[in-house]
Image: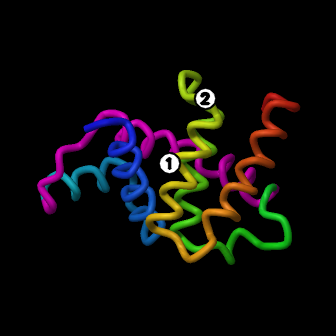
Amino acid sequence: MNRRQAREQAFKFVFESEFGNNNAEDIIEIARSCREEEIDDFSKNILIGVKEKESAIEEYIEKNVTGWKKERLSKVATSILKIAIYEIMYIEDIPENVSINEAVELAKKYGEKDEFSYINGVLGAFARDFKKCNF
């Protein structure tokens, strides 16, 4: 599985987590046993990281969604934003522009019409703040 496919798998896991109180291990076990998915280490690490840092990530989303409340975002958009923000903040070997571009591609595939544009703007604002403040 290449990195893009693994990120898409991570997106599906994070999206799934938006609908319940399952922890990362439960989501992975369900995928493995019920759907017989091969779990990529990268996607597993993304899911675990997003779940561990979820409250901080959600604060950054709230801060950067101008004119909206985080609760108004679709679960698709929220999941994509969580993954990209996690990558930008915690995975040093992925350039931020790659994380943003991959998020936009996921939004084009799974999101509402034009949601990719909004996600791009939110992540661009976050990345500028992140560089400036170095959270």
Considering the whole magenta stretch, tell me its main secondary structure: helix
Q: Farthest top residue?
A: 93
Q: Which residues are magenta?
A: 34-63
Per the image, label 2 sits on a secondary structure element best described as loop
**Above-or-below relation of 74 to 21:** below
Q: Is residue 109 left or right of residue 103?
A: left
State which quarter of the image contains the N terminus: top left
**Above-or-below relation of 115 to 83:** below
Which residue is at 59% across, 63% downward? 78
Magenta stretch: includes residue 57:
yes
Q: Which residue is mark 2?
A: 95
Per the image, label 1 sits on a secondary structure element best described as helix
Residue 117 or residue 47, whichever sits in front: 117
Which residue is at 31% across, 33% downward? 41
Which residue is at 15% across, 61% downward? 35
Q: Which residue is mark 1?
A: 51
Whether pointer 1 and pointer 2 mark residues with C-beta atoms closer than 8 Å, the reply is no
